[in-house]
Image: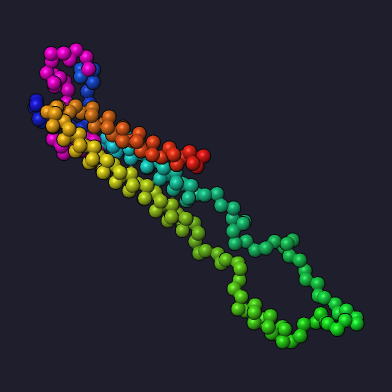
């Protein structure tokens, strides 16, 4: 292998020198930058993964945050008292002449109705103390979950890909160009998009 000095990130260069007129030339080209240490390969892969992979989670998290925190909620449908035009005045029943039954409730019936009404809970849900703050907290939790998931995915994916590539290149005694980490970071981002595709199709 050539000089093992670690280049600074990103240390990208013109890739044409690796593809054109390479016959009978050394494996490392003048003007190129190469990685040899597995930790450096992981670090380069992680940086590129943060740039190409993590933004998808950040954008989706921000979109979910805005949809939850600023959802268009019709306030006049929430906890609103019944309209005056919906109230119907009750008309007392009149006694029917010659009927053995009377429409006037007895005293014990009134007591039974009052006790039943006292035990029956109201169907109307009491208004929340601060629904906007509750929605904002839930939206913030969703955003944090997206960001943490993207960060963990970047770390785990970079570790697996970076150290695996380092082992393969070391086994073959090859010099890894600094273009390899961004290429595989892009592959990881595309695989993530392919995993989301079936869910999007089901939603649509």
| 177 lies left or right of 103 | left
**In front of the other: 129 or 31:** 31
Give above or below for 2 relative to 112: above
Q: Which residue is drawn at 9% across and 30% down?
A: 4
Identify the residue at horizontal 86%, vertical 79% (top origin). Answer: 95
Q: What main secondary structure does the magenta stretch of the protein show?
A: loop
Relative to 123, 101 lies left or right: right
Question: What residue sits 59% from the left and 62% below the top?
Answer: 79
Front-lying residue, 95 or 200: 200
- Tell whether position 140 is magenta: no
Q: In this view, does 103 lie above or below 74?
A: below
User: In the displayed image of the protein, which residue is found farthest to the right?
Assistant: 98
What number of labels is visible?
Answer: 0
Picture quadrant where residue 33 is located: top left
Residue drawn where x is 28% and y is 37% of the image: 49
Does residue 3 appear to the left or right of 195 in the view shown?
A: left
Magenta part of the chain: 19-46
Q: Which of the 4 image quarters holds residue 186?
A: top left
Image location of residue 142, percent across then percent down: 40, 51
Quarter of image, res 50:
top left
Instruction: Where is residue 30? Give x, y as percent.
Output: 14, 19
Q: Is residue 34 magenta?
A: yes
Q: Where is residue 150 in the image (x, y as percent from the top left)?
A: 33, 44
Seen in the picture, residue 90 relative to 190 is either above or below; the reply is below
Q: Is residue 132 visible?
A: yes
State how the image is colored.
Answer: rainbow
Query: Where's residue 91, x and y in %?
Result: 81, 72
Q: Could you tell me if residue 7 is visible in this image?
A: no
Quadrant of the image containing the N terminus: top left
């Amino acid at each position: 292998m050539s000089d093992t000095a670690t280049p600074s990130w990103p240390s990208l260069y013109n890739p044409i020198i690796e593809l054109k007129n390479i016959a009978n030339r050394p494996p490392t080209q003048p003007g190129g930058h190469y990685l040899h240490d597995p930790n450096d390969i992981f670090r380069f892969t992680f940086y590129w993964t943060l740039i190409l992979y993590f933004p998808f989670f950040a954008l989706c998290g921000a979109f979910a945050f805005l949809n939850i925190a600023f959802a268009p909620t019709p306030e006049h449908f929430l906890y609103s008292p019944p309209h005056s035009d919906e109230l119907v005045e009750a008309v007392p029943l009149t006694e029917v002449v010659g009927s053995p039954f009377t429409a006037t409730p007895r005293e014990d019936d009134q007591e039974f109705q009052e006790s039943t009404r006292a035990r029956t809970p109201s169907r109307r849900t009491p208004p929340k103390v601060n629904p906007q703050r509750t929605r904002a907290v839930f939206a913030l939790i969703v955003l944090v979950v997206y960001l943490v998931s993207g960060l963990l995915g970047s770390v785990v994916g970079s570790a697996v890909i970076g150290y695996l590539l380092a082992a393969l290149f070391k086994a073959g005694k090859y010099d890894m160009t600094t273009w390899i980490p961004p290429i595989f970071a892009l592959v990881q981002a595309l695989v993530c998009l392919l995993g989301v595709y079936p869910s999007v199709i089901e939603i649509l």
